[in-house]
Amino acid sequence: MFKKGNLYFPTEKFRKSALANDKKIYQEAAKDPIKFWEKLAQQLFWFEKWEKAFVHKPPYFQWFQGGKINITSNIFEKNTLGFNKIKNKTALIWEPEPTNEKPRILTYDELFKEVNKFANALKKLGVKKGDRVGIYLPMIPEVMISMLACARIGAVHVVVFSAFSPSALRIRLQDTGAKILITTDGYYRRDKVINLKQNADDGVKGTKVKKVVVVKRAGNKIPWQKDRNLWYHELIKKQSDQCDPEVMDSEDLLFVLYTSGSTGTPKGTTHACGGYTVQAYWTGKWIFDLHKDSILWCTSDPGWVTGHTYTVYSPLLNGVTTLMFEGAPNWPTPDRWAQIIEKHKATIFYTAPTAIRMFEKLGTDLVRKHKFETLRLLGSVGEPIDEAAWKWYFKEVGKERCPLVDTWWQTETGGILITSLPGIGPFKPGFTGLPFPGVKVQIKQENLLILPPFAPGLLRGIYKNPKKYLETYWSQYGKKVYFTSDAAYKDKNGLIRIVGRVDDVIKVAGHRLTTGELEAAINLHPDITECAVIGIPDKIKGEVPVAFVVLKGKKPELKVKEELLALVRKQIGPIAKPKEIYIVKELPKTRSGKIMRRILRKLFTGKELGDLSTLANPESVEAIRKIIKK
Ligand code: WTA
């Protein structure tokens, strides 16, 4: 890239070879976004073409109405590159955490067969089109195979992040009514074996799950219920490696993925087959500039939306190689991630600002030992990337050569909606850039909004909760405007900078949580009268939660704190653990009794507290300040 003023642009060489390199696509798309998306959709394989491209009945909308499609057909037998051309090409490189284990490589043909075998196995277990299937797997190849097997037969996958607790798993299984769960015996994390089967057993209690399919990964000892448990490897042994794709309506559900809700109950965002396929395919192609020989390493776990779209679906739809790593990026050495890039010759590296800041902290010298000669593009996602991290990433990893795409999107949007394109630019540190062609955004009172026709991959609803869908996304600016809950502004070049969430969502190491769900977990403790959780800035993780609690009873404070940490872990998972728990006499409240979390936050950011006279108990603020100082 080269710099002009405070903007960066791709070099002429990069621009020339880029798949999207003509500014005109923006004008063409803006003129008629529906027609534009239709043109893109036409390049994929449809069993039957749609009748109407976009149908809007606010707050609902449909894309490619009447069209028939299967996402796995577009990955395999009908891949746009031609299946014969990609058959023997590597689809997946899987790098295990233990360094003495060999990577597992699957070609497109091998992956296809694995998917078909498991799809047939699921059918044998009675899974039918429209049934929900729970997937509680770590980053092992079977997470991808399971997702694709579901999609093959039209079952709706519900992936639950493997580091979520049994209770978090249970809520999701109950909400979707899944009857099958796929999990594993255990997996490696920093040399330790995590017994996931035990968690899965706890999680399925009180759900409709009848069968638990267990992938053998770590070989650890696990509880086994003969009537309900099945080994994955035994199940697929006798299955045929051919399975016809289910013909799906464009608007049929492809998956449900949960995201934190304000009140503690997570929201199941629903995604439709046709629109999601189109958006996953094209955003990946243009934003990561996916050429035939690309090797994309998206570090996100498929338990999150980034993993759904850019570890699994988008690279495979584009017929390129996707890289998946089982472990932690800094294990067993701080530069494991860098070694993996070099070992597997990754050409695109897509990760979160938290990881970037951690890499920097662990040592720039260590990073400088690596030349990253194969890298041609970098990506960032999940939280705002500060200018310093942007520049470090660009210089030390991208060697000032690779374009850096800062991609803005959400679980709800299914795919990236805002980022400048690498072959066009411009880029500016701290700014996510321009909306993807065909996406209309508006910023009103600093709120980031998306206007019709939205984008084909945007959520179609919240599973079984139309009221929440309407309230959360379509009530602030009317039923025709999608409210993102992000604050943003534009610079004079039209580049967008994301400021952060305007609701109670916090991003802990890029993982989405709400202060509401943490408070709900803490309030379960019998000694808590009330509590408030806020996110405070953190140098590495972006944000971390801290909790303020008011106690009743006489239990020693230290003991309560320990129990609260254990409780949060049990209810949500280790990622939600508060950095600090402050025991206070009272929380600052308005006269109407509303807890003023905003004021608590300001105690950490050093911002002016402002007028406290509206509070019912202004003196509480000073008392809390003293406790924090201690
Ligand atoms: C935030 C992750 C700044 C934003 C794909 C959004 C970002 C929320 C960026 C969604 C970015 C995501 N710059 N902020 N490039 N990307 N966000 O559902 O607040 O886990 O609303 O989806 O992450 O988080 P989610």
Image: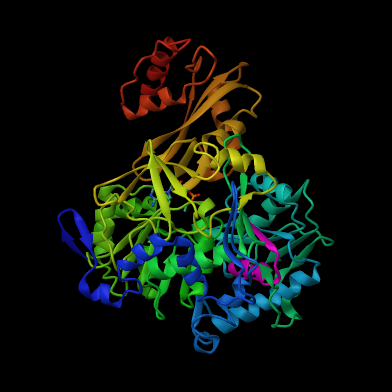
- In this view, the residue in front, 440 or 390, is 440
Farthest-out residue, left: 5
What x and y, as percent, mark residue 99? 46, 69
What x and y, as percent, mark residue 15? 26, 72
Q: Residue at x 26, y 59 (%)?
A: 426
- In this view, the residue in front, 525 or 290, is 290
What x and y, as percent, mark residue 97? 49, 65
241 versus 401 height, above or below:
below
Q: Quadrant of the C terminus?
A: top left
What x and y, as percent, mark residue 69? 63, 72
Q: Give the quadrant of residue 448.
A: top left
Q: Quadrant of the N terminus?
A: bottom left
Farthest-out residue, bottom: 84
Q: How many marks?
A: 0
Judged by its main secondary structure, the magenta piece is helix
131 versus 75 height, above or below:
above
- In this view, the residue in front, 535 or 309, is 309
Instruction: Find the magenta span and give its range.
Output: 142-159
Q: Is 174 left, or right, of 395 in this rendering? A: right
Q: Is 155 included in the stretch rendered in magenta?
A: yes
362 versus 260 height, above or below:
below
Q: Residue at x 37, y 26 (%)?
A: 602
591 versus 394 height, above or below:
above
